[in-house]
Each structure stands twice: as structure tokens, then as C-alpha cells.
Image (spheres, grey):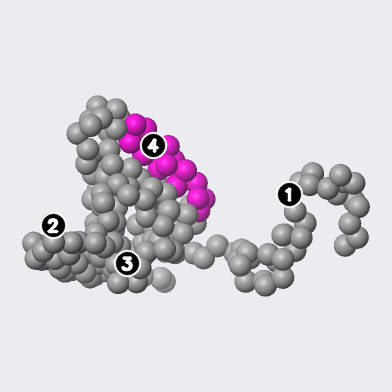
Amino acid sequence: MPDPLGPLFDALESINSELTSFAARLARLEDAGAVRGASKQGGSGEDGDSANTRAPGAPVAWHKVKEEERAELWGEFTAWVIRMADRYELTTEQLPHACWWEHGAVVEELTALWTGWESAYGSEEDAAAGPYLWHDAWSRAIERIGRMWLGECTNGYHHQKSRIVFGTDPGYRKKVLEAGPPGATAAGPDSKAA
């Protein structure tokens, strides 16, 4: 006869694993915050030491962030995501707790929300409209994010999507470039031999 408490112990083990992972991430974020706080106190301002400091609300394109700035920026971003997920009581159906950072499209949506939040709440110029518009964008983006993996990762485990990566075939880009945009040729799409 199977152990009736087996599923309970399995669930507790999973919860313990998530808590351990969360504690490790929190420690890394706290360490990053301490380093960031020290660097801000240490010398930004008139003397030009803060040339690499990103202005709050400035767009972030992760593939363009310099390697030496990536860890600090990622720490700020991650702290914001965790704070917002708790503040707005997001469910795992809205944001997969175990693996949101492994979904590129989710990271891009959240990055846009983060920079928008910094812009909306970091300026006194348009204090009334900025936060209101940000909340409108937040609700639409969270709805989109929830559809991005169609529930594959909501049970606490990350599942890689089965897909072909566009950039792995060197001939693919060439083929697309040679095809040109739709309607580009006067003779029509059937004029080229494949």
C-alpha cells in the first residue's frame, strides 16, 4: 500500500527547495544593494565619477548592457520585480515564481514595466498622469505575461518550450533577406524559382 503521506512530504520538499533558493537570491540581492549603496555614497556627482550611471527610467536593452554594469542593473531590476510581485500579489499563473527570468519575453515585458515605473514615479513633472498610465500598462502587460507560456511553468517547475531558435541556421537570415518584403517585386511572389 502506498504511503498516504508521500505526496505531502514531496510537496514539503519542493517548498523547502524553493525557500532555500529564495534565501540565496535574497542574499545576493542584499549584497548587490550594499555594493550599490556604497558606490553611490562613494562618489557620484560633479566630478564625473558617475559616467556609467543609468538615469532612472532610461530604457534598458539587456543585450547592450556592458558586462561590468550587468550584475548591478540585474540586481536592481530583480529587486523591483520581486517587490512588485509581492505588492500586487501576483499568482504563479500571472508570473511563474520558479523561472520568470528564464523567459526572455517575460524579462523584456518586466524591464519595460520597470523603466516605465521609474519614469512615472521618479518625476514630479507629470505626477498625476504618469502613475495612472503606468498602472494601465501594468495590468495589460501582466495579462500578456500570463499568456506567454500558457501555464507550462505555473506548477513550480520550468519547462523549456519546444521550438526552433531562429538565429541558429546561418542560411536562414540570408534566405529571408533574399526574399524581401511582401509585394516587393512587380512580377509577384511566384516569379522567383525556389
Residue 32 badge: none
Q: Is residue 39 left or right of residue 105?
A: left
Spatial CA distance of label 3 from label 4 is 26 Å
According to the picture, the residue beneath numbered tag 1 turns out to be 181
Which region is colored magenta?
133-150
Residue 9 in magenta?
no
Mark whose residue sits in front, 2 or 4: 2
> Element under label 1?
loop
Residue 70 badge: 3
Dominant secondary structure of the magenta stretch?
Answer: helix
| Residue 120 screen position, x and y as percent | 27, 38
Camera-side residue: 13 or 124? 124
Mark whose residue sits in front, 3 or 4: 3
Residue 79 quadrant: bottom left
Mark whose residue sits in front, 4 or 1: 1
According to the picture, the residue beneath numbered tag 4 turns out to be 137
Camera-side residue: 118 or 8? 118
Are the residues flagged by discs 1 and 2 in contact, CB closer than 8 Å? Answer: no
Spatial CA distance of label 4 from label 1 is 31 Å
Check disc 1 and give the amino acid type. Answer: Pro
Crowding at dot 3, Cα within 10 Å, few <14 / some 14-19 / many 20+, comes out as: some
| Residue 53 screen position, x and y as percent | 24, 59
According to the picture, the residue beneath numbered tag 2 turns out to be 45
Q: Residue at x 55, y 62 (%)?
A: 161
Residue 148 in magenta?
yes
Does label 1 or label 2 sit earlier along the sequence? 2
Does label 3 or label 2 sit earlier along the sequence? 2
Residue 45 quadrant: bottom left
> Element under label 2?
loop
